[in-house]
């Protein structure tokens, strides 16, 4: 047997060649091997770590081409201690892409379902808004219509006091319609970024007193209590007086609207760092935790309990939050069902 054949039959040499070939095939596993002479039925190179019987039972048998070196038929036998590991290793790339594909499909399906749910919810909210706003418009229109019919009555011409009452009703309902239309238009302008703010020096305490004077009769008529604690040392801010007054009106009217028979409303002011803080708290029906995150969304109205039965079209709080944001401030809500709601507005002082 020549020197080349002896070199080939060297275990270390064969082990290095087999290892390199397995690495090229991306197979990294513990293995043993043997060289078997089928003519003599003996191992030319015996197994290193396992029995000859286990080696002969291996499925990985490769016939060596007959040559000057191997005149008799020889076989290279490989034995892997972890065949399953090799299988998963070979399949890992394919399994990875399959997993990525399944996750992608599942994500698309969940995203589609979520978008469908959002669209359905938006349709419900807008339908609810249309129904509410239609009802809100119908009431003053019907009242104006009845007042006009009363004024047309010939017998009423002599009743000066009654005539004046009807005219007053028409004016009030007309103003109510104007306010509702104005709210809708202002919110539309806000969404398009077309609302122009007229910034000026504004004393928030003066605005609060102006609003509370206007609603004091309404509260006293309902045997309610309105408490004012204007403790802010700095109540001067730079803002649009008209819109700032509107947000106070919206929050105070909400406090009255969602209170029980006798409203108890507490209005407080104080300063926190560079902010003027306005707190308007009622002891009414409150808002559930799950609804508090969405309460500032346009058209959104809580659709359970007594809140749904209260007049409104879901524009007020959306308008309030946008106006506060335009003044570089923010608004927080603290509420608990059947215990009341507290809206806290933070506006930067001048």
Image: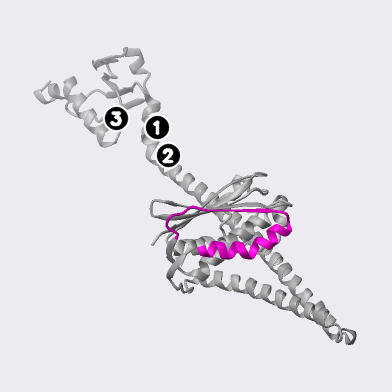
Residue depth check, mark 3 versus mark 2: number of the one nearer the observer? 2
Q: CA distance from mark 1 to mark 3?
A: 11 Å
Q: Is residue 271 left or right of residue 39?
A: right
Numbered label attached to residue 28: 3
Whole-percent x, y for residue 326 in the image: 45, 65
Magenta range: 206-235
Q: Is residue 264 left or right of residue 348?
A: right
Asked whether 27 or 176 is in front, the reply is 176
Query: In this figure, which residue is indicated by the disc labeled 1?
Result: 88
Q: CA distance from mark 3 to mark 2?
A: 18 Å
Local packing at callout 3 (Cα closer than 10 Å; few below 14, some 14-19, many 20+) is: some
Q: Residue at x 61, y 59 (%)?
A: 252
- Closer to the chain start, of discs 2 and 1, is 1
> Do labels 2 and 1 touch, CB within 8 Å?
yes
- Closer to the chain start, of discs 3 and 2, is 3
* Image position of 253 with respect to 100: above or below: below
Is residue 322 visible in the rendered image? The answer is no
* Image position of 196 with respect to 301: above or below: below
Query: In this figure, which residue is indicated by the disc labeled 2?
Result: 95
């Amino acid at each position: 047997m020549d020197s080349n054949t002896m070199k080939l039959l060297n275990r270390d040499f064969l082990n290095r060649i087999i290892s390199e070939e397995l690495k090229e095939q991306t197979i990294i596993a513990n293995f043993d091997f043997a060289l078997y002479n089928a003519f003599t039925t003996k191992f030319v190179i015996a197994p290193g770590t396992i029995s000859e019987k286990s080696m002969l039972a291996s499925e990985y048998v490769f016939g060596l081409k007959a040559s000057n070196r191997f005149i008799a038929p020889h076989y290279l036998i490989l034995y892997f201690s972890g065949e399953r590991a090799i299988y998963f290793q070979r399949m890992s790339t394919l399994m990875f892409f399959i997993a990525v594909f399944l996750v992608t499909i599942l994500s698309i399906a969940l995203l589609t379902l979520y978008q469908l749910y959002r669209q359905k919810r938006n349709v419900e909210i807008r339908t609810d808004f249309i129904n509410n706003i239609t009802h809100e418009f119908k009431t003053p229109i019907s009242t104006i219509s009845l007042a006009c019919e009363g004024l047309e009555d010939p017998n009423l011409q002599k009743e000066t006091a009654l005539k004046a009452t009807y005219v007053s009703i028409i004016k009030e309902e007309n103003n109510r319609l104007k306010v509702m239309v104005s709210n809708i238009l202002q919110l539309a302008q806000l969404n398009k970024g077309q609302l122009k703010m007229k910034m000026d020096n504004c004393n928030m305490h003066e605005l609060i007193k102006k609003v509370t004077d206007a609603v004091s009769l309404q509260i006293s008529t309902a045997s309610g209590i309105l408490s004012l604690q204007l403790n802010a040392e700095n109540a001067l801010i730079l803002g649009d007086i008209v819109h700032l007054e509107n947000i106070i009106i919206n929050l105070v009217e909400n406090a009255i609207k969602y209170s029980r028979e006798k409203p108890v409303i507490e209005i407080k002011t104080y300063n926190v760092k560079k902010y003027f803080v306005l707190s308007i708290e009622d002891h009414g029906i409150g808002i559930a935790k799950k609804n508090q995150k969405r309460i500032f969304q346009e058209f959104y109205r809580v659709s359970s309990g007594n809140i749904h039965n209260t007049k409104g079209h879901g524009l007020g709080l959306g308008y309030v939050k946008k106006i506060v944001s335009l003044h570089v401030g923010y608004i927080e809500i603290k509420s608990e069902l059947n215990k009341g709601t507290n809206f806290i507005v933070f506006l930067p002082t001048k």
